Amino acid sequence: MFESRHMRHLAAGIALTIALTACGSSTASVPQPVPTPAAPTVTPYQTMTPTPIPPTPAPTPTPTPGPTLSSVAAEKYFHPLAGYELVVPPPEVATQLQALVSAPEVTDIATGVALRLVTRNGDAANMAVLSLSLLPSYAALPGVLDEFAASYSQAAVERFTLAGHPALYYQTAPKSLVWAHRTYILVVYGTDRAAMTRLGEALIASNP
């Protein structure tokens, strides 16, 4: 990358040098006499045609920003779990998350979103959990999990029951475990299905 960029700069420098050399390398010639300028002619009573003034364009309305999701409602699903720590991600991760979920398709049906990184007895567990709190009117709709799944991924999905709740499992990278509970959609991301399942069961048990 550096080498090709350096070559581009070198080629541009050579081209600029050639251009400057061409401009400054004109051969000296015999001085030519300067012609006497002709006297300008003035037409009496010359009329001036006014230049039309273009109409002022109408101001463009500034779009009103849509609603943003708060993390407060979604964080209510997170409770202390024995052996686990749910860690707040760095600010730049939270900023990226808010940008991803700021689409009207999300803000029209949800009230909040929150992400937590997971450690197990103090060590990184290679997992993260996302909580999406829905408006009660949407959470009560039949098949809300299927609706979520339809827009979540086009990958093959396995349906099963997690601690008495319908759940979806995606063999993606990272793997995804999704379930609906009360007014929440939960997603656990990870690499080990057994560990993800144990975390999902612990999260459900903490919200009796």
Image (cartoon, rainbow, N blue to C red):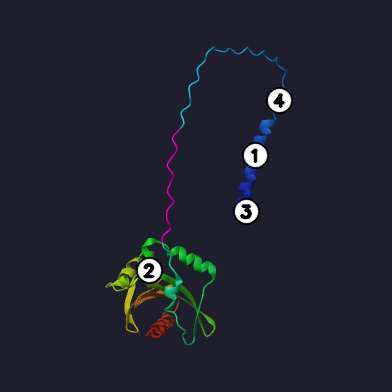
The residue beneath circle 1 is 16
Is residue 119 in the magenta section? no
Q: Quadrant of the N terminus?
A: bottom right
- Residue 51: image location, x then y, percent: 48, 26
Q: CA distance from mark 2 to mark 3?
A: 49 Å
Contact flag, marks 2 and 4 (Cβ < 8 Å): no
Work out whether mark 2 precedes mark 1 in sequence or the reverse, and give the earlier one. 1
* Of the two numbered discs 2 and 4 in the rendering, the one whose residue sits closer to the viewer: 2
Query: Identity of the amino acid at label 2?
Result: Ala
Tell me residue 127's x, y (percent): 47, 77
- Tell me, for residue 27, which label it has, or none: 4
How many other residues sit within 10 Å of disc 4, few (<14), some (14-19) or many (≥20)? Answer: few
Please report whichever mark, 2 or 3, sits nearer to the chain's N-terminal start: 3
The residue positioned 32% from the left and 81% from the top of the image is 165
- Separation (CA) of disc 3 from disc 1: 20 Å
Q: Which residue is mark 2?
A: 110
Q: Disc 1 on helix, strand or loop?
A: helix
The local secondary structure at tag 4 comes to loop
**Which residue position is annotated with label 3?**
3
Q: Is residue 197 left or right of residue 25?
A: left
Residue 135 visible in the snapshot = yes
- Mark 1 Cα-neighbour bin, 10 Å: few <14, some 14–19, many ≥20: few
Q: Position of residue 46 (x, y in %)?
A: 52, 15
Majority SS type along the magenta span: loop
Density class for disc 3 (Cα within 10 Å; few <14, some 14-19, many ≥20) is few
Identify the magenta region. 54-66
| Occupied quadrant, residue 77 | bottom left
The residue depicted at 35 percent of the width and 84 percent of the height is 163
Q: Are marks 2 and 3 in contact (CB under 8 Å)?
A: no
